[in-house]
Amino acid sequence: MGRLAGKVAVITGAAQGMGEAHARLFIREGAQVVLTDLNEEGGRALAHELGGNALFVRQDVACAGDWEAVVRAAEARFGPVTVLVNNAGIIGPVKGLLEFSEEDYLRVCSVNQLGVFLGMKAVLPGMIKAGGGSIVNISSIAGMLGTKESSNAAYCASKWAVRGMTKLVAAQHGASGVRVNSVHPGYILTPMMISATDEQGGGAADVIPLGRMARPEEVSNVVLFLASDEASFVSGTEHVVDGAMIAG
Ligand SMILES: NC(=O)c1ccc[n+]([C@@H]2O[C@H](COP(=O)([O-])OP(=O)(O)OC[C@H]3O[C@@H](n4cnc5c(N)ncnc54)[C@H](O)[C@@H]3O)[C@@H](O)[C@H]2O)c1
């Protein structure tokens, strides 16, 4: 029996990067998984490869109507959603405050912050009805401190917001058996990070005590634990996966 047997999971931003790694691991551990993404071609191809326990639904996480469609599709195919991984995110241009536009600020926050809010709102009624569930919100080390070399005001603000909302919802809905936690990756080798570190001219691994960036699967293992019943008393907490980058 897999560690997620019987769970119905929605993973956003699952067409590539960490979302893809989470989807692959969740399927291996017995979950039925709805993969969502703006990238229809990539998402569909991955769901096809993963087989009958995977379903792709095209979604913009910043659109409330899309969330309704995702929950409807999940329920119709697999049953009530009991795990949500709010993973989709964008970084925007890595610039200082004075160069950062209001337009970029709103765009980044609409995906990273509003998207997480809408996702939790969409799945909570079903989780409450089902007697519980697990929500894993992907924040960042940029939600633990100001990461001036690799981030921007909107990314940092949105990732702190995710950490804050996580605690509030965990406290408000714990009595219904719903657990909510945040995960804070450091530098992980995904298309997003590869392009952001290229802008900095490399050298990212030098600031990581473990001496390297992480593979996406190393974050998936933490997400898997939080999604599973092994984490039955873990809620309202943040889980940093950064090779000790912010420890010192
Ligand atoms: N890579 C890192 O080092 C790192 C570090 C800390 C936090 N994170 C966070 O982890 C999460 C995943 O990042 P990644 O590195 O795998 O990124 P990525 O860019 O490789 O993948 C993100 C996926 O999200 C999708 N997406 C973007 N906007 C969307 C929207 N509005 N609706 C639906 N899907 C959308 C993209 O199409 C893409 O498939 C993000 O929330 C990111 O902020 C990443």
Image: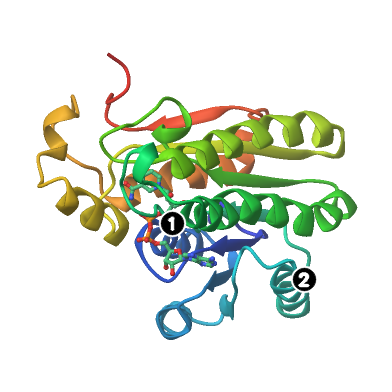
Chain-order first, disc 2 or disc 1: 2
Inspect this view and state whether residue 1 appears.
Answer: no
The residue wearing badge 1 is 90
The residue wearing badge 2 is 68
Return the x and y of residue 41 as percentages of the image width and height. Answer: 42, 86
- Residue ID at (32%, 22%): 246
State the CA–CA distance, disc 2 to disc 1: 22 Å
**Mark 1 residue's CB less than 8 Å from ligand 1:** yes
Q: Is residue 27 left or right of residue 65?
A: left
Neighbor class of circle 2 (other Cα within 10 Å; few <14, some 14-19, many 20+) is: some
Q: Quadrant of residue 22?
A: bottom left
Return the x and y of residue 150 as percentages of the image width and height. Answer: 28, 40
Q: Quadrant of residue 184?
A: top left
- Residue ID at (28%, 24%): 244
- Mark 1: amino acid: Ile
Q: Vertical placement of 123 versus 39: above or below?
A: above
Inspect this view and state whether residue 152 appears.
Answer: yes
Q: Vertical placement of 1 versus 231: above or below?
A: below
- Relative depth, front residue between 149 and 233: 149
Quarter of the figure that contains the N terminus: bottom right
